[in-house]
Image: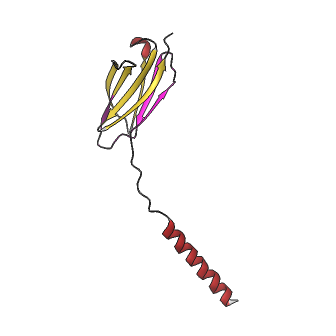
Amino acid sequence: MKKLLCFVVIMLLIATNIKAQDKPESTPAKETLKLDIFPNPTHGKLTFWVYQLPDSVEQAIIMIYDFMGKEVYRTEKKMEGNLIDETIDLNEITDSGIYCLVAKAGNETIKKNFIFKKE
């Protein structure tokens, strides 16, 4: 009985050691700038969230371009915590079409396309 118990303990130790060696070392994930926009398509108001801003960045530049590359909107927003939460009324800015919202914070830039159908 002692031999069986010793065998089981040794096997468990070996199995634990093998699993620990096979497991890759965890590396911290690089936080990259994120952008969410909704609703898409929109009929007027567009809400966007810019988050996971680099720690050294205090604000982001938000730009909207039409499909021809013309800038139709630009603003600088200070982050609240690690988030910029903004709603824009597109009816006051432009006509129906396909647009690209660009957020730039520090050295990072992210883009998302959306459709605006003016009512």
Vertical side of 114 occupied by 4: above or below = below
Q: Please state if 19 lies on the left or on the right of 61 as rendered.
A: right
Q: How many marks?
A: 0
Q: What x and y, as percent, mark residue 40?
A: 51, 24
- Residues in magenta? 33-61
Vertical side of 54 occupied by 112: above or below = above
Towards the viewer: 81 or 66: 66
Q: Please state if 69 lies on the left or on the right of 2 as rendered.
A: left
Residue extending furthest bottom?
Answer: 2
Residue extending furthest top?
Answer: 119
Q: What x and y, as percent, mark residue 85?
A: 42, 30
Vertical side of 14 occupied by 94: above or below = above
Name which residue lies at 57% across and 74% down: 15
Q: What x and y, as percent, mark residue 26?
A: 44, 59
Towards the viewer: 21 or 90: 21
Q: What x and y, as percent, mark residue 92?
A: 40, 12
Residue extending furthest right?
Answer: 1
Vertical side of 12 occupied by 69: above or below = above
Q: Please state if 75 lies on the left or on the right of 112 as rendered.
A: left
Name which residue lies at 40% across and 31% down: 111
Q: Quadrant of the N terminus?
A: bottom right
Q: Please state if 119 lies on the left or on the right of 108 as rendered.
A: right
Q: Looking at the rendering, which quadrant does residue 14 occupy?
A: bottom right
Towards the viewer: 75 or 98: 98
Q: Looking at the rendering, which quadrant does residue 78 occupy?
A: top left
